[in-house]
Image (cartoon, helix red, strand yellow):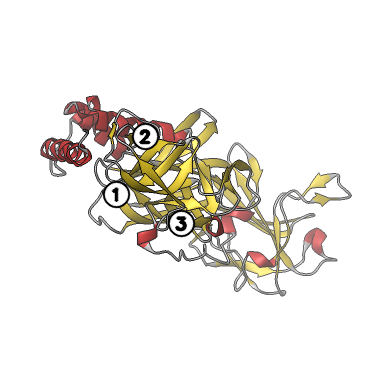
Amino acid sequence: MFNIQLTINMHKRLYYFLYLIFIAACSRNATLDNFFTNATPYEKYKHSLEKTQLDQTALGADWVKAGEISLHDSLLVALPYSEAGYFSPEKPTALCLQYQVREGQKILITLEALSQPDAIFFMDVFEVINDTSFQRIQAADTIPRLAYEVEKSGWHAIRIQPELLRGGAFLLNMRFEPSLSFPVQGKASSAVGSFFGDPRDGGKRAHRGIDIFAPKGTPVLAASDGVVGRVTQNRLGGKVVWLHSLKKRFTQYYAHLDSQAVRPGQRVVIGDTIGFVGNTGNASTTPPHLHFSIYKLGSGAVDPYPFVHALLEEAPAVQFDSSQIGIPARTKAIWSNVRHSPTTQSPIQGSYPKHTLVNIEGKSDRWYRITLPNAQRGYMHDSLIESIDQPTDAIELTDNDRFYFDFTDKAIRGNLIAGTSKVVAAFDTLLYIQTPQGYYGWISER
């Protein structure tokens, strides 16, 4: 008769043995080869697995594979985004989230380890070129914090993966803020009344900036450190100031000023007054406002709104019980939808019947991030999920019943001790049960 407890103990010992080997070979105080001086923390760690041949073990190979697969199995979120999540220390896994970005935004990402504060989480940000191509643009580990400015609008993806045999609960926060200061004193992006690309002159041309409305005489402020270029007057812009940004490859254009307060060649810092709101030039018949443009070297005018737009609200605070994350649960509706993003507007990836087993891996507002037994990932609304504490049925087992620890890998299996087991969930043709000895696993549906 198969001894389930013995098998579990053997696997725990294997994990512990591999962990000791790895710690001895990859001490955080050790110096890596000079060859990898410029490598990212993730690449250095992967190299250390190869040096100790842990990548040849099932555990090490699974860790490498999890990182690679996650890029092609990512979920979609919108910024700002907050999540309480969980990584099982026993099973290598990685999380990849894609999010849309706009040129001029500054992206801020922080991760806080909760249950294992000293665990290392590798964070890598990629530009999504297409469905199969990703270009790394940022990386972090021991300081789980990333801040970077977006140079091109599109989609980015963040991959988060803990080191081997570590993980546990964590808090993830992702948001954006403007990379420039707002250029009109006392105002915010809600004062923008005309946007980039809006038609002008009956559609003959497009607006090449944004219009920020404010009372005449309101100070116009430098949105970044820079050197003043031209201070002049023209037919369209009226009284204008050009400001060449320091350390940035673009020039700012301030137009319709009532008066200018700087001279060519003058160095200014963020917040310095460079002029005052007016309606000079072709704005003489409109309420006073600042026309603000950004001209990027080699690209011409770009939309300045993301450069100055700040969030009015943060992502909803995650209300969660850490004991309810990283555990199995089941669906309770007749049919429950799994979605690609935590919103009802997101495409449905699949619908599953009542009592389908799901593993809860994260919580964001009212949405659980879940993984199904067949490894499909997605989001499910928390109103559709319940605990497996109460059985849905009971089943009498015999010595001939085959018991599987894992839905997808049935190599670990054995005969069960006969007795009454609790049926707590199901998936496909298998039942998820709790044996009289308290073990959870799968048997074939009868």
What kind of residue is marked 2?
Ala
Please tell me which of labels 3 and 2 falls first in the chain: 2
What's the residue type where badge 3 is placed? Answer: Lys
Q: Quadrant of residue 276?
A: bottom right
x, y percentage for residue 267? 49, 59
- In the picture, the disc for residue 66 is 2
Q: Position of residue 292 (x, y in %)?
A: 66, 57
Q: Nearer the viewer, mark 2 or mark 1?
A: 1
* Image vertical order of residue 400 relative to residue 301, above or below: above
Q: From the top left corner, tell me how far across and down residue 227 is, in percent.
A: 52, 54
Distance (Cα) linking label 2 and label 1: 34 Å
**Foreground tag (3 vs 1):** 1
Q: Residues within 10 Å of mark 2 (few under 14, many from 20)?
A: some
* Mark number, residue 436: 1
- Residue with the mark numbered 3: 363
- Near mark 1 (Cα within 10 A), the count class, few <14, some 14-19 or many ≥20, is some
Q: Which amino acid, by three-letter code, is at mark 1?
A: Pro
Q: Quadrant of residue 181?
A: bottom right
